[in-house]
Amino acid sequence: MSNKATLQYGDKTYEFPVITGTENESAIEIGKLRAQTGLITYDEGYKNTGVTQSAITFLDGELGILRYRGYNIEELAGKASFVEVMYLVLYGELPTKAQLAAFENELTMHTLVHENLVKVFEVFPSRSHPMGQLMTMLSTLSSFYPESLNPNIKPEETNLTIIRLLAKMPTICAMIQKKGKGHPILYPQNKYDYVTNFLYMTFGNVSEEYVADPVIVDAMNKLLILHADHEQNCSAATVRIVGSSHANLYASIAAGVAALWGPRHGGANQEVLEMLEDIRDNYNGDVEKVVQEVKDRKRMLMGFGHRVYKNFDPRAKIIKVACDNILAKLGVNDPLLDIAKKLEQAALNDPFFVERKLYPNVDFYSGIIYKALGFPTQMFTVLFALGRLPGWISQWKEMRERKEDIGRPRQVYTGPTERPFVNIEDRK
């Protein structure tokens, strides 16, 4: 195979190098395209544009493959903790026992948030959206750690910023959940591991002891692992492009939260629950009628199929088991969950869905689990952000280490051509 691509434009021919990644993905390197030809590429939504070379996540949508740093998602979700996966995506290798213990200890020592940040949080209206609260809180952290604003700090100082952000994220997410319920916030407890501490701060109560169920801890670990990174999606690309301006890590991650907030990106599991509520309220739970409407192209189902995965979502197979375990363990009796199970069976068995590969995806099952655990629907995207945080940080860290140029996309201008200015009294 040639390592060059040829472009013929007008009466001239141009050659551009072809680069190939470790999984045999190839790309035409067009960094000099405009300088040599006067042309730019046009690719709305960047669907066919590689913006970086990354060693973090490999995704093959046709084959249903997802790997972090070379490790299959099935093995990581079945054998690793979320903290191990954090370490992996951040530093490139699974930690040894000593490295994991040191990493866990660092996280434990930085879980508290400044009391003045708590005061800022307290002034948010009780009905403000959780994602708005999260975005504001994360960007505000830079005010408490002004040294993070310096883009030229030493690597060990950058790493401290990373540790602080990872450690404080569960505390902030739990605060948002508590505020929504009107309950007093709980401070983190050093005796708990990362995920258990989050569950304690979220579902614990100042008036009684909280004991996290191992089944729930395991399910939360899996959910967070499955969401830890997903290549160059909208929010990850946002973190990288904001970070390319040398914006501090807190601001860059807050920008990622803003991107995730959009319902076309991070709101899919929330849309699943809203769909189930619609079927309950407007169809009296008649799943067969809804399925027929889907076949007649009268409506869409949320949480089925995936933009990237053309065969199946490998994460969905993993989380389906955790979903079944959670529902069995909690013995939840909820009409919404009954509707969800009927939809799942229709999608897995009905030829219409099977032939079109419209299988339940990770958003379908994660929404069901969050609902069963008692999270309000508006918190679902916050939980997505909690899981995606190590991936965002890894993307930012990699971008800085590669010394990438500031992101500056081009455009094809389609507005008016040059025209003279008209004085206001002469305008019609």
Image (cartoon, rainbow, N blue to C red):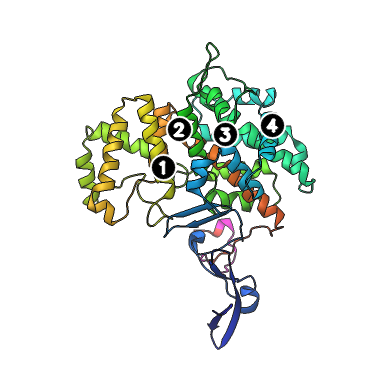
Which tag is nearer the camera, tag 4 or tag 1? Answer: 4
Q: Are marks 2 and 1 in contact (CB under 8 Å)?
A: no
Dot 2 or dot 3: first in sequence order is: 3
| Circle 1: residue type | Asp
150 or 357, nearer to the observer: 357
| Circle 3: residue type | Leu
Dot 3 or dot 4: first in sequence order is: 4
Indicate the secondary structure of the residue bearing disc 2.
helix
Q: Quadrant of the N terminus?
A: bottom right
Indicate the secondary structure of the residue bearing disc 1.
helix
Queried whether the magenta region covers residue 294, the answer comes back as no
Crowding at dot 4, Cα within 10 Å, few <14 / some 14-19 / many 20+, comes out as few
Which tag is nearer the camera, tag 4 or tag 2? Answer: 4
Queried whether the magenta region covers residue 421, the answer comes back as yes
Dot 4 or dot 1: first in sequence order is: 4
> In the drawing, what numbered circle is on residue 105?
4
Between the residue at mark 2 and the residue at mark 3, the CA separation in whole angstroms equals 12 Å
Q: Quadrant of residue 172?
A: top right
Q: Main secondary structure of the magenta part?
A: loop
| Circle 4: residue type | Asn
* Residue 111 picture location, percent across and down: 66, 28
Crowding at dot 3, Cα within 10 Å, few <14 / some 14-19 / many 20+, comes out as many
Between the residue at mark 3 and the residue at mark 4, the CA separation in whole angstroms equals 25 Å
Crowding at dot 2, Cα within 10 Å, few <14 / some 14-19 / many 20+, comes out as some
Which tag is nearer the camera, tag 3 or tag 4? Answer: 4
Q: Which residue is mark 3?
A: 134
Q: Quadrant of residue 118?
A: top right
Q: Which residue is mark 2?
A: 378
